[in-house]
Amino acid sequence: MPVVISFVSTKGGVGKTTVAANLGGLLAAFGLKVLAIDADVQPSLSKFFPVHYRSSQGLTAVVTSGGNPSADCISRTIFSNLDLVYSDTPDAALQAWLNRREDRLMILRRAMRSPLVDPYDVVLIDTQGAVGELQKSAAMAADVMVSPVRPDALSAGEFATGTIAMLDELDRLADFGESFRSGDLLALINAHERTTNARALAAVLRQRFSEHSKVHVLDTIIPSAAAYAAAATARVPVHDFDRRQRFENSAWNVMHRLAWELFPSLANVYAGAPPCSTGDTGTGGIRQGAVA
Ligand SMILES: Nc1ncnc2c1ncn2[C@@H]1O[C@H](COP(=O)(O)OP(=O)(O)OP(=O)(O)O)[C@@H](O)[C@H]1O
Ligand SMILES: [Mg+2]
C-alpha cells in the first residue's frame, strides 16, 4: 500500500502546494511511483507541472464513486513516475455532496486502498487552506499530515489554534474504533527568513509542541527563497531548478533533507545526479523517520 501524506492547514498561503508539488517531483526523481491528488477546490497543484496525458475525469469522480473510482481519473505529468488527479470542482458542489454523506470522512481513505491507487509508492494530497469536509476527508486518508507553518505570528497562531483544533476533532473519531484513528501531524517551518523574529517563532513552535503526542515539528526548515516561486513559474521541481549542491540551503539540499527526514530509508538517495565530492549534501541534522 502507498504511503499517504496529506498537506493540511487551516491557513492559506503557507506553502502546502509548493511543498507537495516539489516533494512529489523529488520522490518521482528518486524512482518512486508518485500520485499527486489535488483536493483543493481552487486548483493549483493541478496546474503546477505540465501534463502530457489528461484523463477524462478527476477528483470529483474519485470522491463521488465513494472512494472506488472505475473511471479514467489519473493524468500523467511530463515527469516520469509523477501522476496527477486534478481538481475539477470549481464550485462548492463537492463539499455539498460530501456533507450529505455519513461516511464523508472516510471516502478518501477508502480511495487510498482502491485498485486505482494501489500501484503507487507514495500519494500526496494537497488541500485548501480552510476548514471543510474535503480537507477532513483528505486528513483522514493520510498516514501522516504535513502542515507548513510560516514563522510569522499570524501563521504560527493559526497553526496553534485552527489546525490543531481540526486535528483534535479528527482525533475524537478514534473513540469509534482503531480504524478511525488519524495520523500524526508534522509541522514544517516554511519560508523561514533569516531574522531574529522568525528564529524566535520557530523556537516557540518547537517548545510548544515538544510534549504533544501527535504533533511533531520537523527538523528540516525550508528557507524563504526566490527559487520556490521561480521554479513554479518554470513548472519544474525546485530541486532541479536550484541544483547548488555546495550551498547548504539550496533547494536541492533542502528538498533532499526533507525527503530523507520523511523517508529515512531513502537517506543518501539522490535525484539522478551524484552529490558533489565535498559531500556537503550529507544527512546532518536528520534524526528519525517521520513516515516510514
Ligand atoms: N519557501 C518559500 N520561499 C519563498 N516563497 C515561497 C516558499 N514556499 C512557498 N512560497 C510562495 O508562497 C506562495 C504561497 O504558496 P502555496 O501556494 O504553496 O501556499 P498554499 O498553502 O498552497 O496556499 P493555499 O492555501 O492558497 O492553497 C506562492 O507564491 C509560493 O511560491
Ligand atoms: Mg495551495
Image (spheres, rainbow, N blue to C red):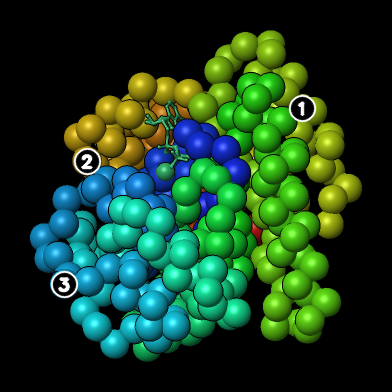
- Give me the disc on residue 56: 3
Name the one closer to the observer, 278 or 170.
Answer: 170
**Disc 3 residue: CB within 8 Å of ligand 2:** no
Say what amino acid the circle numbered 1 marks: Ala
Say what amino acid the circle numbered 3 marks: Ser
Residue 232 point in image, percent of width and height: 28, 36
Residue 262 point in image, percent of width and height: 57, 56
Name the one closer to the observer, 267 or 20.
Answer: 20
Mark earlier in primary sequence (1, 2) = 1
Say what amino acid the circle numbered 2 marks: Arg
- Vertical arrangement, residue 124 with respect to residue 283, above or below: below
Residue 193 point in image, percent of width and height: 55, 18
- Vertical arrangement, residue 51 with respect to residue 42, above or below: below
Circles 2, 3 touching at the beta carbon (< 8 Å)? no
What residue appears at the point 47 percent right and 62 percent down from the top-left corner?
95
Q: CA distance from mark 2 to mark 3?
A: 22 Å
Mark earlier in primary sequence (3, 1) = 3
- Answer with left or right where residue 90 lies relative to residue 209: left
- Answer with left or right where residue 120 lies relative to residue 262: left
- Answer with left or right where residue 122 lies relative to residue 60: right
Residue topped by disc 1: 203
Residue 178 point in image, percent of width and height: 76, 82
Residue topped by disc 2: 235
